[in-house]
Image (cartoon, rainbow, N blue to C red):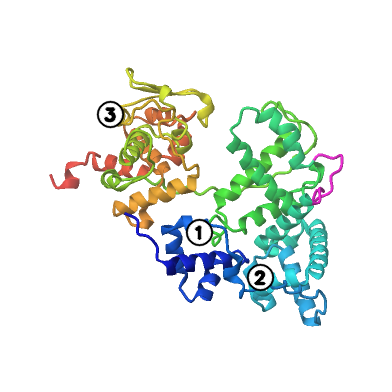
């Protein structure tokens, strides 16, 4: 039964309503009444009908109408000392060169807060200095691209050139002047993509565009007829001296060879046609060529059966993804089992559709658009794979739905699974290691089965990049017949 409020409570509520009608908030009204705000909040919950009554002005005659204090005047722009002016100019130059905010603050000798304050307090000066710094940087990039200056600090150059290109794009103009002569990048877009990459995957096209973006920023994207062997050498050396994915080490020789391979392929297609180059454009008479660095093949990384068992058992701790009609541990166990038994790439795995599984025939048929090779791929599903697939069979579309989108987040969660399995961080593996594990095991029994399972057009790619030959050779050497004298027989 609701308790009836006392007269003192009714009076306090009525006075609070009258005070707040003059513009004061709950906390201010409580201070005037000599109570804590919680008392008024509690009465508002218990007696909302009293708070809904119209205010009685007589109860707040002694309280003036609340007036907001006038806004503080904005600081005057101007009155900048010579030191601050010089620091602002220096800061805008460094930002235009692609330096990070902490780097700029350290170089100028101030805090990051001071830089933000300058941008607001001295907005006009900052704008003028930034505009001039950007124009100067664009002029420097246009003048020095393709020269030895790029090689002095490649990463700093790429940051500066990237900033210059971004600013030019905002202004609606190209970083490097465009004329009627074809350059490597314009040749790629106008000729090579339509003629050679019409059915290529987006990843293939984007990789080549990434390489050409580096080419443009490093060399200035000169006309095809102006590309020389020394310029190719500068590009090679610049890529070799640029930061790798970890931002610490340099790019590997394999990456350098891959970048040069893209550039050389485009130059060949711009060169004269021949028996092995029938679709060449014939734009340049003599194709420049430079020897790429020798490719270094690292032994493929495989995963032991014991480690796979640990991961399989640890999947019981997983709580993502959810909401698909089965528990998360079953999702992870099936993913590991199917990857190990089919050797499919991660991109293909997450495109698999339930309708592609022929349940009665134990086959998985993947259409060309979901394969890197662009060909139909049919693979046998053994009983272990089928058992796990049936365990997560529902009427959904995708076999392995991942609602979070991000590939990086997938591997973040996959690392958690391996942590739960007790695997040291340095020994964590990705799904591609399972593909290489399958290739190695099948190769020992049948090289052709290994090639076909991975969907490779030739066995050389499988052997060079996917098969860990050490274990195969070791097993063969252990079975090697020995003369009796060798063993003391």
| Front: mark 3 or 1 | 1
Going from N to C along the chain, the mark reached first, 3 or 1, is 1
Towards the viewer: 190 or 291? 190
The x, y position of residue 247, in whole percent, is 56, 60
Towards the viewer: 35 or 334? 35
Residue under label 2: 65
> Helix or strand or loop: what does disc 2 sit on?
loop
- The answer to whether residue 243 is above or below residue 483 is below
* Residue at the far left in the pictured view: 489
Whether residue 67 is in magenta: the answer is: no
Q: Tag 2: Cα neighbours inside 10 Å, few (<14), some, or many (≥20)?
A: some
Give the left or right position of residue 267, taking residue 324 as reference. right
* Residue at the far right in the pictured view: 180
Give the left or right position of residue 173, taking residue 456 as reference. right
**How far, Cα to Cα, is label 2 from label 1?**
20 Å
Disc tally is 3
Residue under label 3: 387
At x 36%, y 52%, the residue is 416
Give the left or right position of residue 348, taking residue 176 as reference. left
Towards the viewer: 373 or 281? 373
Towards the viewer: 7 or 280? 7
Visible in this render: residue 277? no
* Magenta stretch secondary structure, dominant: loop
At x 59%, y 70%, the residue is 60
Q: In which quarter of the image is residue 144?
A: bottom right
> Helix or strand or loop: what does disc 1 sit on?
helix
In the image, the segment drawn in magenta is 171-182
> Helix or strand or loop: what does disc 3 sit on?
helix
């Amino acid at each position: 039964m609701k308790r009836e409020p006392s007269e003192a409570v009714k009076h306090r509520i009525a006075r609070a309503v009258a005070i707040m009608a003059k513009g004061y908030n709950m906390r201010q009204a409580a201070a005037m009444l000599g109570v804590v705000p919680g008392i008024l909040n509690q009465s508002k919950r218990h007696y909302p009908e009293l708070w809904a009554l119209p205010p009685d002005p007589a109860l707040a005659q002694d309280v003036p109408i609340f007036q907001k204090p006038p806004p503080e005047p904005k600081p005057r722009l101007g009155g900048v000392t010579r030191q601050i002016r010089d620091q602002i100019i220096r800061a805008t130059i460094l930002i235009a060169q692609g330096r990070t905010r902490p780097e700029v603050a350290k170089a100028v000798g101030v805090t990051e807060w001071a830089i933000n304050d300058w941008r607001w307090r001295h907005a006009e000066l900052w704008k003028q200095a930034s505009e001039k710094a950007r124009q100067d940087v664009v002029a420097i990039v246009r003048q020095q691209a393709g020269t030895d200056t790029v090689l002095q600090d490649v990463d700093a150059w790429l940051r500066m050139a990237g900033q210059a290109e971004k600013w030019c794009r905002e202004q609606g103009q190209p970083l490097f002047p465009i004329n009627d002569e074809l350059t490597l990048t314009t040749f790629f877009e106008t000729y090579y993509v339509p003629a050679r990459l019409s059915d290529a995957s987006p990843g293939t096209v984007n990789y080549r565009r990434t390489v050409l973006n580096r080419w443009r920023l490093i060399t200035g994207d000169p006309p095809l007829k102006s590309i020389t062997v020394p310029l190719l050498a500068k590009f090679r050396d610049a890529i070799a001296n640029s930061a790798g994915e970890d931002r610490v080490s340099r790019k590997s020789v394999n990456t350098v060879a891959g970048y040069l391979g893209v550039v050389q392929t485009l130059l060949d297609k711009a060169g004269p046609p021949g028996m092995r180059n029938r679709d060449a454009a014939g734009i340049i008479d003599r194709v420049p060529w430079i020897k790429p660095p020798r490719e270094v093949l690292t032994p493929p990384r495989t995963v032991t059966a014991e480690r796979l068992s640990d991961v399989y058992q640890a999947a019981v701790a997983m709580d993502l993804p959810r909401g698909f009609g089965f528990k998360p541990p079953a999702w992870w166990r099936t993913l590991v089992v199917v990857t190990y038994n089919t050797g499919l790439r991660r991109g293909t795995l997450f495109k698999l559709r339930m309708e592609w599984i022929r349940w009665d025939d134990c086959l998985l048929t993947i259409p060309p658009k979901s394969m890197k090779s662009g060909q139909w791929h049919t693979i046998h599903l053994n009983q272990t794979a089928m058992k796990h697939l049936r365990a997560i069979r529902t009427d959904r579309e995708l076999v392995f739905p991942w609602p979070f989108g991000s590939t990086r987040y997938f591997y973040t969660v996959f690392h958690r699974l391996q942590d739960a399995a007790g695997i040291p961080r340095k020994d964590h593996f990705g799904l591609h290691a399972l593909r290489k594990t399958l290739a190695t095991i099948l190769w020992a029994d049948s090289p052709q089965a290994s090639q076909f399972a991975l969907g490779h057009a030739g066995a050389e790619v499988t052997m060079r990049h996917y098969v860990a030959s050490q274990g195969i050779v070791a097993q063969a050497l252990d079975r090697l017949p020995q003369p009796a004298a060798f063993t003391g027989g």
